[in-house]
């Protein structure tokens, strides 16, 4: 038995010797590689940060702005004096100081009142002399205001006819107000009352326009259209053409008014404005009746047209 396996002992000794040699060689290779890597990364260069560029932000310590140079700085020695052109005067100081009250008011913040006597005139014609008035008073804001319009004619101490309107106006567009209210006619044989609604404002090319429709009792309707235009000859001398027409939807024989286009006025006034608020004027106008109204005038012996010479004054405040 011993003789049968005696040849294995030398073989096992050879195998163990080869294994020991292989491990020794492997360890030597790793040692060489590490040595090469250490040579490539050995001795790293330290980066030095200048102290002036170092910023350390800490939530516990506030930043010191005294060491930072901000934009701007002190004005140069040759900089312009900001108060040189005002002789040293400053807004809010001295004579330009603002009071405790507000100096600037916003649009539609306050109510105001105005009165315009557009026509207060003496009229001469073949039918005799008369006094005519046409004025308007308004009170309210720029958007909402109460307006009273009054127009009439008196002769020999008697009011021949008059139209008075009480209207509530509301601005619907720049230069335009819508108006709603009532109209009272006095001085006619039978006085009339109307519900009125219309517009008043300045049309393109600066025409002053007043257009109002009326609804009365017994199904009566009426429409009144008026327009004026200020033609400046110079800054004080102004020529003002004026036109007005009246239409009715139903005959009113008691008051001498026929259905349809009943009457019209065209005229021209030349005024001189001593100020914007006071201006005397002279002028001429032609009154005309149409249709059934003219027929009623002829039937009663009256003329259907009349030329009138005018002298008056226009003022407002």
Image: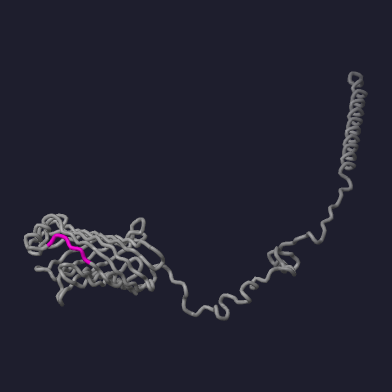
Quadrant of the image containing the C terminus: bottom left
Q: Main secondary structure of the magenta part?
A: strand
Is 34 rendered above or below residue 238? Answer: above
Residue that sits furthest to the top in the current view = 4
Identify which residue, 89 or 55, lies in the foreground: 89
Identify the residue at image location x=17%, y=73%. 154
- Image quadrant where residue 232 sits: bottom left
Is 248 rendered above or below residue 34? Answer: below
* Left or right placement of residue 234 versus residue 192 in this view: right
The percent position of residue 76, horizontal first and vertical second, equals: 74, 68
Residue that sits furthest to the front in the current view = 126
Whether residue 304 is in magenta: the answer is yes
Residue range corresponding to the magenta coloring: 303-308
The percent position of residue 39, horizontal first and vertical second, equals: 90, 42
- Image quadrant where residue 83 sits: bottom right
Identify which residue, 101 or 284, lies in the foreground: 284
* Left or right placement of residue 110 versus residue 285 in this view: right
Quadrant of the image containing the N terminus: top right
The percent position of residue 269, horizontal first and vertical second, equals: 29, 65
């Amino acid at each position: 038995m011993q003789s049968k396996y005696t040849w294995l002992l030398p073989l096992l000794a050879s195998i163990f010797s080869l294994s020991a040699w292989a491990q020794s060689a492997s360890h030597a290779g790793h040692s060489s590689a590490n040595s090469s890597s250490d040579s490539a990364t050995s001795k790293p260069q330290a980066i030095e940060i200048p102290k002036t560029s170092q910023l350390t932000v800490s939530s516990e310590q506030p930043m010191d702005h005294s060491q930072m140079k901000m934009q701007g700085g002190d004005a140069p020695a040759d900089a312009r004096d900001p108060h040189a052109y005002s002789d040293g005067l400053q807004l809010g100081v001295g004579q330009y100081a603002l009071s405790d009250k507000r100096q600037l008011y916003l649009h539609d913040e306050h109510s105001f009142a105005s009165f315009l006597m557009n026509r207060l005139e003496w009229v001469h014609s073949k039918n005799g002399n008369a006094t005519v008035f046409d004025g308007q008073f308004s009170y309210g804001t720029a958007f909402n205001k109460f307006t009273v319009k009054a127009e009439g004619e008196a002769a020999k101490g008697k009011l021949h006819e008059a139209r008075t309107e009480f209207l509530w106006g509301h601005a619907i567009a720049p230069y335009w107000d819508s108006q709603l209210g009532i109209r009272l006619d006095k001085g006619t044989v039978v006085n009339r009352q109307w519900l009125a609604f219309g517009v008043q404002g300045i049309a393109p090319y600066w025409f002053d326009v007043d257009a109002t429709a009326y609804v009365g009792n017994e199904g009566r309707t009426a429409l009144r259209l008026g327009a004026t235009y200020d033609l400046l000859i110079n800054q004080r001398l102004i020529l003002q053409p004026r036109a007005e027409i009246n239409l009715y939807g139903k005959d009113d024989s008691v008051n001498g008014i026929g259905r349809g286009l009943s009457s019209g006025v065209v005229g021209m006034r030349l005024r001189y404005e001593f100020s914007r608020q006071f201006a005397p004027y002279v002028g001429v106008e032609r009154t005309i009746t149409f249709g059934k109204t003219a027929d009623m005038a002829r039937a009663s012996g009256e003329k259907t047209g009349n030329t009138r010479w005018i002298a008056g004054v226009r003022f407002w405040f």
